[in-house]
Amino acid sequence: MNIEQKLPEIQKKLKESQLDGWLLYDFRRSNELACEFLGITPEHFTTRRFFYWIPQKGEPVKIVSKIEPHVLNHLPGKMIKFLSWQELELSVKAQLSGLKRIAMEYSPRNAVPAVSKVDAGTIELVRGFGVDVVSSADLMMYYTSTWTEEQLNSHLNAAKILDETVAKAWKFIGDALKQQRNVTEYQVQEFILQEFATHNCVTEGKPICAINAHSADPHYEPKPDTSSIIRVNDFILIDLWCKEDKPQATYADITRVGYAGPQAPQKYVNIFTIVKNARDHATDLVRQRLGRHMPLHGWEVDQACRKIIEAAGYGANFIHRTGHNIHIKDHGNGTHMDDLETHDTRLILPNTCFSIEPGIYLPDEFGIRLEYDIYVHSDGSIQVTGGIQDQIVSLF
């Protein structure tokens, strides 16, 4: 991102948020959000602390070590060089003198770990200069979580590949069973990875194929020597995610369930229906609230989804958040649909994407998770991507 071009917009947002400025800090890439925002790539050699101060009005200030003055050379602003720790502290203090409220990559009580990147000692230092430090979480997301039109198209292509790949995986399993050939969870995983390679896609980690009790483990990973053979009448969960193998491509992420027989037994259908209703209820909230240009926080989506499963008596079996932000990493740094693992108070912004993936997991029996992705357009309308599963897939 070109900070110089974005500076008027950033300063406008600071004014709207009643912030005197934004203080970005890093030490040895401890603040990956600041590094991404400032365009400090992994190729940059950084071993010393630096601060980048963006005031609500006026010119930014670069506070850098005399040993590494080059680290912020690509950014606009006046440069202040320090050698000793005393000079560093005085330089920061001078910029904050007389100010009241600034933003940093901080989360009160570490409620949202994904944005809590500045260490407690540095926060203590800055507060010691008489300013109130608030979270830059929503501000940062405008610049590290929103997508370009090209990134949206990349995501849509990845989502299409996933939808087609899982359909091929069901056929791969079904054909093997009909022909009475052994097929394992691991072989399905390898089949999916080969499809990704064919379409020039990459993935973080490996897709999941989990049958019966294995599907009750949300992060089960089939191994070549321990994965199960899939047999007739088994319940099957497939979770897969990928992106195009090109710079700034964005992920898509889906989960589907199937039954290795002509018709799934009622015990699976009952749980599937609850999970589907929870997914749809959460999606309706997103569609209605954002369609009316009303604010919506990640925790609210999680609550809307979770209350459906709780009302059905399975609250204790929904053991993860409702969804996660999606960006150039499968689990991005933007708003998560979460009021379980964290209380995510961040807003859902236009031009961002996230998953909706409720699940019910019955230990030693089976688990059902349904996942698709939602992209929020600039006008507040939403687009569900990756396909919508409304019934359990029957392989025969």
Image: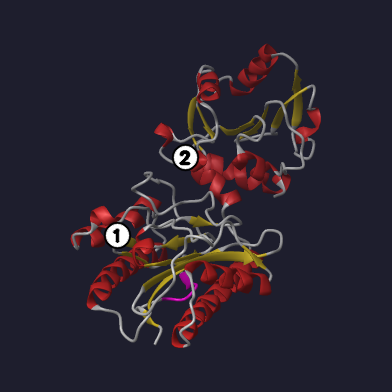
Q: Nearer the viewer, residue 315 or 105?
A: 315
| Location of residue 272 in the rendering, given as x and y in whole percent from the top left corner | 30, 71
| Residue in the image at 55% along x and 71% along y | 159
| Disc 1: CA contacts within 10 A as few (<14), some (14-19) or many (>=20) | few
Give the amino acid type for the residue marked by disc 1 in the picture: Asp
Q: Is residue 315 above or below residue 173?
A: above
| Location of residue 90 in the rendering, given as x and y in whole percent from the top left corner | 65, 15
Q: In this view, does 337 lie above or below 21?
A: below
Does residue 297 appear in the picture of this structure? no
Q: Nearer the viewer, residue 183 or 120?
A: 183
Where does the magenta region start and end? 382-388
| Location of residue 276 in the rendering, given as x and y in whole percent from the top left corner | 32, 70
Is 363 left or right of 171, judged from the image as shown?
Answer: left
Q: Nearer the viewer, mark 1 or mark 2?
A: 1
| Disc 2: CA contacts within 10 A as few (<14), some (14-19) or many (>=20) | some
Q: Is residue 386 magenta?
A: yes
| Location of residue 59 in the rendering, given as x and y in whole percent from the top left corner | 70, 34
Give the amino acid type for the residue marked by disc 2 in the picture: Pro
| Residue in the image at 53% along x and 21% along y | 121
The residue that disc 1 covers is 364
Q: Are marks 1 and 2 in contact (CB under 8 Å)?
A: no
Image quarter hosting the C terminus: bottom left
| Residue in the image at 62% along x and 48% along y | 9
Q: In this view, does 191 lie above or below 83?
A: below
Q: In this view, does 311 lie above or below 259?
A: above
Q: Which badge, 1 or 2, is on the more N-terminal residue?
A: 2
* Mark linked to residue 113: 2
The quadrant in which residue 295 appears is bottom left
Q: Is residue 15 magenta?
A: no
Q: Nearer the viewer, residue 318 or 189?
A: 189
Using the numbered discs, state the Cα–Cα distance from disc 1 to disc 2 in whole angstroms. Answer: 32 Å
Determine whether the residue tagged by mark 2 lies in a helix, strand or loop.
Answer: helix
